[in-house]
Image: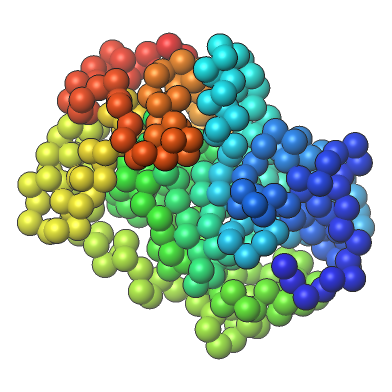
Amino acid sequence: MDKNEDLAWAPAPGHGPEVVYAVDGPLGRARLNRPRTINALDRASIDSLFQQLTTWAGDDSVSAVVLDGAGDRGLCAGGDVRALRESVLAGRHEEAVDYWRAEYGVNALVADYPKPYVAWMDGIVMGGGVGVSAHGSLRVVTERTQLAMPETIIGFFPDVGGLQLLAHAPGQLGTHVALTGTALGGADALVLGAADVLLPADAKEQVLGVLREDCAVSGDELATAVGSGARHSSGGSWLEENRAWIDECYVGDDAGVILARLSGHAEPAAREAASSIGARSPHSVAVTLEAIRRAASMTVGQVLSQDLALGPAFARHPDFAEGVRAQLVDKDRRPRWTHASVADVSRAEVLRAFDGG
């Protein structure tokens, strides 16, 4: 939490404390406020964000929005997938789809926001946390950032419009991130195109001061203003250093072929990637590959529409409930997937997912 404690933080009218807001000079400050869950986005959080961001979009006294997270662990660990699993297991699939529809509505609002939207992406930024931050106009990461779209390990797919960002990353870097769910540091987030500037975590007060003076400041200008320790280049990026084998192995539309290339590659990191993908839901991996290829020619809004079309298929597929069980409920890390490998997922099954089946 920042040092400026004299701000009057309060929930949006008619909403609970899951997200709190304050006016800080020309800035509308939004803070995800569930620190015990690393600010996971439940339905109440999503509805609150949509209401307040919509209000501020039409409020001339608010020149820019700044999003951060309560606590010291991160901005947001993602959506409340345990609650979604309970809905699915109870046969209330439409409840899960309604959640995604509302969440993607917030993502679309962020992507098209009419004012500067600044995301302070410190610490853990995963899944749904990417959706409320990486579509903003100024994305700030720090040396503590751990950004990931890890959905394939829970039998889901990288949603919240994230595949639009990943599909437009250099070479095949986005495909690697989508299929493996690997966590990225700040420098890697810059290379991927999911962030604009890397600043020290202890520079937050300085950043807010700059924004109060110039709400439309760019990443380069912010880095210059902060000075020592600020970066807007990609030096030290693991993705950049490993791009040669990533671009070589991940080309194409066949997940089985990609996995074979990785498994047989001389580079140890490639074989580690193969092992990581092999532990994930084969259904999720195969559908995610098709989805990221389609996303390459789509806008953020179109990718969010694709995400919503895929949601019902994943809600009904056994791998989603099983993946959440293994990772987040029982935490035994031993999921029993429907398919033994990606080679067992037919092309017809992949295509059915895009029809909601």
Residue 338 location, quadrant: top left
* Front in this rendered view, residue 268 or 240: 268
Residue 14 appears in the rendering: yes
Q: Is residue 101 above or below residue 26?
A: above
Q: Residue at x 58, y 61 (%)?
A: 73
Q: Position of residue 110 (x, y in %)?
A: 67, 45
Q: Residue at x 53, y 57 (%)?
A: 124
Residue 264 placement, left or right of 76: left
Residue 216 placement, left or right of 334: right
Q: Position of residue 162 (x, y in %)?
A: 49, 42
* Front in this rendered view, residue 68 or 332: 332
Residue 137 appears in the rendering: no
Q: Is residue 189 above or below residue 348?
A: below
* Front in this rendered view, residue 72 or 301: 72
Q: Position of residue 2 (x, y in %)?
A: 74, 71
Q: Position of residue 35 (x, y in %)?
A: 67, 54
